[in-house]
Image: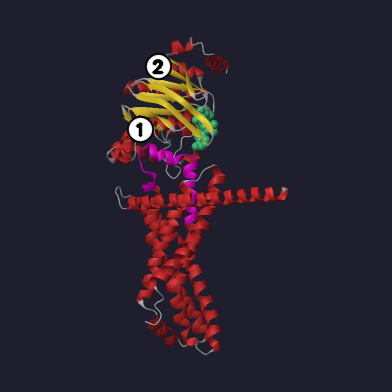
Amino acid sequence: MHSCWNTAVESRIIVELLLGALKRIIEGAGNYAIFSARAVKLAFLPPFRLRLILSQMEFIGVNSFFIVFLTGSFAGMVFALQSSYAFKLFSAQDLVGSTVALSLTREIGPVFTALVVTGRAGSAMAAELGAMRVTEQIDALETMAVEPIQYLAAPRLIASTVMLPVLTMVFDAVGTIGAYIVGVYYVGIDAGTFINRIQYYVDPEDVYNGLIKAAVFGMVMATVSCYKGFFAKGGAKGVGEAITRAVVLTSVSVLFVDLLMTALMGSGVGK
Amino acid sequence: MIKIERLYKSFGNQPVLRGVDLNIPQGKTTVVIGKSGSGKSVLIKHILALLRPDSGRVLVDGREISSATGRELGRLRTNFGLCFQNAALFDSMNVFDNVAFPLVEHSGFSRAQIKQRVEETLTAVGMEGTEDKFPSELSGGMRKRVGVARAIVHRPQIILYDEPTTGLDPITASTINDLVIDVQKRLGLTCVVITHDVAATFRVGHYIAFLHEGVINAYGTPDEIENDPSPKLREFIRRGRAG
Ligand SMILES: Nc1ncnc2c1ncn2[C@@H]1O[C@H](COP(=O)(O)OP(=O)(O)OP(=O)(O)O)[C@@H](O)[C@H]1O
Ligand SMILES: [Mg+2]
């Protein structure tokens, strides 16, 4: 009897907790959607803040170049090495170049670039906006009749959407070069065959699709990071939490959006 | 003129404002006093619609700012200058760009005009020569003075000061009080000053409002406030004078 009452209460508490969590998630998603829609809309409305956009492009793009270069070359080399082990089993090592190039352009390039840049620039966006929120700088913008989403989020959104495809191209290029170096000089594939296979199997469409993905990932990164920073509260600790959440949420969202887009774009196999 | 009508605001289940009624007359200085945590900053943020009331409203020259949005809100806000309690300077910008910000955004001034006005204003708050410094390189009091400069640089019709002298040495504090009085007189502005400083209250204010337990507990000219019987107000003033 007694334990029966207990279970009833416990299950009610659990249900309430779950409902509460669900409500918060839905609310959060709704607020995020409103925030992002506003940021996108304001990005297309004057005043256009060219100086802010350029400085964000520099921060997101130029300053991420080195880390993208590094991760890209390592990814290409490792991938060439791994696939050469596998292809060796059925003597198809000629395909290493095209396999690496295809995976890079379609998947690994955009996704890796987005994850790396999120760690560097997405976290910085959340930190900067979060600090501005808790020190009332965002309120100050508002009192001076400057729309803070337009002033802060829109330039970051534009810069990310433009720069992520550029960085992805860098990643694809150095990755392929890395694969070439490992494939030709270490595994011993014929240089001509290596390149020939890439030309044969990789279509411009693969590259374009990858770059479109990268642009979408850039939008996701900027909107999520700005959203988390913009609504930070509770001093330094709150800013820290905002940064962590921004990075985690962006990373998960990038992978999820990648899945959706891959499904939408089709595999392109058999063309 | 600013009219605050039956303003209620709670955070969670903590009521802060519980029906504030206050008229802030045009061209005069109204000082709001009250204990720390009594909701003075919350009140001032409602005047600029940085916070939205749970109920009640705020009218600026007959227009309801507490429910305004978008362009209408922006237009209403350009009449204001707000000096934040913690200055809230943009830490990515140097002093010059901070003070120039309202002009760059809305004035349509030329570069030279902006430069001249910024230098003039910085001199008025005693911060000339610091144009190239960043907020992180300034002391708290210096930041505060830059905050005052940024609030008044575009010559708004209404200026709100949230504790402009708290944390300053007596000499600088008195300079700032003189500045508040001087700017108000010279430009005939509407001013709202929040302060703890009882002496400054009587020096600066044409009208004084005492915020206590979420309502305006006492209101009047300095003379009337001096003779107001409210025991809470008497205690506040007595303790303030005792220091
Ligand atoms: N954004 C907020 N979220 C939750 N509570 C808040 C918020 N802003 C203010 N409060 C609460 O409202 C109350 C009044 O705060 P307010 O800052 O207006 O006090 P104050 O009168 O300006 O005090 P002080 O003289 O120390 O500046 C405080 O108890 C504070 O905790
Ligand atoms: Mg305050």
Query: Does the image show residue B129?
Result: yes
Magenta stretch, main secondary structure, is helix
Would you say residue B30 sits in the magenta stretch? Answer: no
Image position of A96 with respect to A264: above or below = below
**Residue density around tag 1, few if under 14, some if 14–19, many if 20 or more, within 10 Å:** many
Residue A101, percent from left and from top: 44, 77
- The answer to whether the residue labelled 2 contacts the one labelled 1, judged by CB atoms less than 8 Å apart, is no
Residue at disc 1, secondary structure = helix
Quarter where residue B114 is shown: top left
Residue at disc 2, secondary structure = loop
Quadrant of the rendering where the C terminus of chain A is positioned: bottom left
Alpha carbon distance from label 2 to label 1: 24 Å
Residue marked by disc 1: B65
Amino acid residing under circle 1: Ile
User: Mark 2 vs mark 1: same chain?
Assistant: yes
Report the magenta residues as a range: A122-151
Image position of B175 with respect to B85: above or below = above
Q: Which residue is most to the front?
A: A1
Amino acid residing under circle 2: His
Residue found 40% across the figure and 74% down from its top:
A266
Residue found 57% across the figure and 52% down from its top:
A18
Q: Which mark is residue B206?
A: 2
